Image: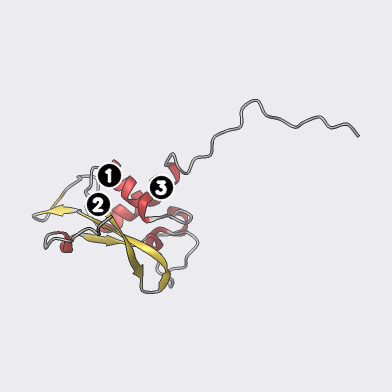
C-alpha cells in the first residue's frame, strides 16, 4: 500500500496525536485535555473514525511519532476549516475537537464490550 502523498492544502490541516486525549498520560507527557474528558489508549484509527462521523476530512499517518513519546506511532491530519470558516459548526477549534474525541472514542463499537447473554456460573460437582 503506497503512502498518502500530502498536498499543499493538507499541510495546513490540524495534526492530532493520540496522546493528546490519552487519560493515562500526564500533561507533561503531552495530554491536552483534562483527565475526566480524556479516554484510555486512543489510536489514530479511532480518531479518524470519530472525525469521519463528525463529517470532518481526516487521514492517519501511521509512520509518524509524537516527539515526547516516539514509541507510540501514528498521528491524524484533520481539516477543521475552509477559508477560515469551520467545516463543522459544532467544532470551531482544535481544542473543541479534542474534547469531542475524548467523549466519543469510548462509545465506538470497537470499544464497547458485548454482554454475555445466557452464560452464568457453571455448577461444578465437588
- Can residue 32 be seen? no
Q: Which one is in front, 57 or 31?
A: 57
The residue shown at (23%, 60%) is 14
Image marks 1 and 2: residues in contact by CB distance under 8 Å: yes
The residue shown at (16%, 59%) is 10
Q: Mark 3 or 1 closer to N-term?
A: 1
Report which residue position mark 2 lands on: 58
Q: Residues within 10 Å of mark 3 (few under 14, many from 20)?
A: many
Q: Mark 1 or 2 closer to N-term?
A: 1
The residue shown at (36%, 55%) is 44
Report which residue position mark 1 lands on: 52
Q: Residues within 10 Å of mark 1 (few under 14, many from 20)?
A: some
Measuring from the top left, give residue 70's x and y in whole percent.
Answer: 40, 72
Q: Which one is in front, 25 or 117?
A: 117
Measuring from the top left, give residue 2's x and y in whole percent.
Answer: 25, 57
Q: Mark 3 or 2 closer to N-term?
A: 2
Badge 3 element: helix
Q: How many marks?
A: 3
Measuring from the top left, give residue 69's x and y in whole percent.
Answer: 42, 71
Report which residue position mark 3 lands on: 105
- Can residue 95 be seen? yes
Amino acid at each position: 500500500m503506497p503512502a498518502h502523498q500530502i498536498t499543499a492544502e493538507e499541510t495546513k490541516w490540524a495534526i492530532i496525536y493520540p496522546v493528546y486525549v490519552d487519560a493515562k498520560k500526564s500533561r507533561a507527557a503531552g495530554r491536552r485535555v483534562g483527565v475526566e474528558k480524556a479516554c484510555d489508549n486512543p489510536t489514530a484509527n479511532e480518531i479518524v473514525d470519530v472525525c469521519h462521523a463528525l463529517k470532518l476530512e481526516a487521514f492517519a499517518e501511521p509512520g509518524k511519532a509524537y516527539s515526547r513519546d516516539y514509541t507510540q506511532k501514528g498521528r491524524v491530519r484533520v481539516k477543521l476549516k475552509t477559508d477560515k470558516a469551520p467545516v463543522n459548526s459544532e467544532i470551531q477549534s482544535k481544542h473543541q475537537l479534542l474534547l469531542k474525541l475524548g467523549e466519543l472514542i469510548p462509545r465506538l463499537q470497537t470499544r464497547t464490550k458485548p454482554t454475555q447473554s445466557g452464560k452464568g456460573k457453571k455448577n461444578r460437582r465437588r
